[in-house]
């Protein structure tokens, strides 16, 4: 039976300060706590990384949607610009049988007529060729449109007499309101 050697002096005093035997703290709960903390941290990082990558995929999908919507908006704006161009408006008006108006007359606030109205230019639908709307996204080479005839305005236009305007309304339910307060317009 082996016995510990007996310590003397200073070594004996230091040996008494240290606990002797199995009274020391157990290491198993501490090791389990450290392992659980490390495992929980790794799992938390994995979940966070997965959530970030899922968010980036959603962001990419939304950016693709925005790009598609922007392209569609630009195509629609090109269509609107093409249909609202003056030559396109004139062509569609002729297709509907409309003709340019004559000389305008203006109604002053006091009920008098300013200017002499003229009749609209008479055009037959047979003289004006039917021109279809241009294809905006046509992949082929652009074709030059045929020249459209412009209505000729003769300088010897017959002058129509100014209509008599009554300052009082013809019906009691209709109220007379001035169209413009600026007689110079």
Image (cartoon, rainbow, N blue to C red):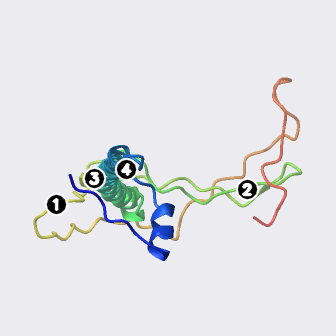
Marks 2 and 4, the one that precedes in the sequence: 4
Q: Are marks 2 and 3 in contact (CB under 8 Å)?
A: no
Marks 3 and 1, the one that precedes in the sequence: 3
Q: Which residue is mark 3?
A: 57
Of 11 and 127, the residue lying toward us: 11
Query: Which of the 4 quarters of the picture holds residue 165?
Result: top right
State the SS at label 3: helix
Say which mark, if any, is on residue 21.
Answer: 4
State the SS at label 2: strand
Say which mark, if any, is on residue 138.
Answer: 1
Real-space Cα separation, disc 1 to disc 2, in angstroms: 45 Å
Depicted 6 relative to depicted 46: above or below = below
Of 36 and 115, the residue lying toward us: 36
Of badges 2 and 4, the one in the foreground is 4
State the SS at label 1: loop
Residue 129 visible in the shown view? yes
Of 68 and 126, the residue lying toward us: 68
Marks 4 and 1, the one that precedes in the sequence: 4
State the SS at label 4: loop
- Residue at point 21%, 67% (across, down): 146
Picture coordinates of residue 27 (x, y %)?
34, 49
Q: Dot 4, how many residues are within 10 Å of its Cα: few (below 14), some (14-19), or many (20+)?
A: few
């Amino acid at each position: 039976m082996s016995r510990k050697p007996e310590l003397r002096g200073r070594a004996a005093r230091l040996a008494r300060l240290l606990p002797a035997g199995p009274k020391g703290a157990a290491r198993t709960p501490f090791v389990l706590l450290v392992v659980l903390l490390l495992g929980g941290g790794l799992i938390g990082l994995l979940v966070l990384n997965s959530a970030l990558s899922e968010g980036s995929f959603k962001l990419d999908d939304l950016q693709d949607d925005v790009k598609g919507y922007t392209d569609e908006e630009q195509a629609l704006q090109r269509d609107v610009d093409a249909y609202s161009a003056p030559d396109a408006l004139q062509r569609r008006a002729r297709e509907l049988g409309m003709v340019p108006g004559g000389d305008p007359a203006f109604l002053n606030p006091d009920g008098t007529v300013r200017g002499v109205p003229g009749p609209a230019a008479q055009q037959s639908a047979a003289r004006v060729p039917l021109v279809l709307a241009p294809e905006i996204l046509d992949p082929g080479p652009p074709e030059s449109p045929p020249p459209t005839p412009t209505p000729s305005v003769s300088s010897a236009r017959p002058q129509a007499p100014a209509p008599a305007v009554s300052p009082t309304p013809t019906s009691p339910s209709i109220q007379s309101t001035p169209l413009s307060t600026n007689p110079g317009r």
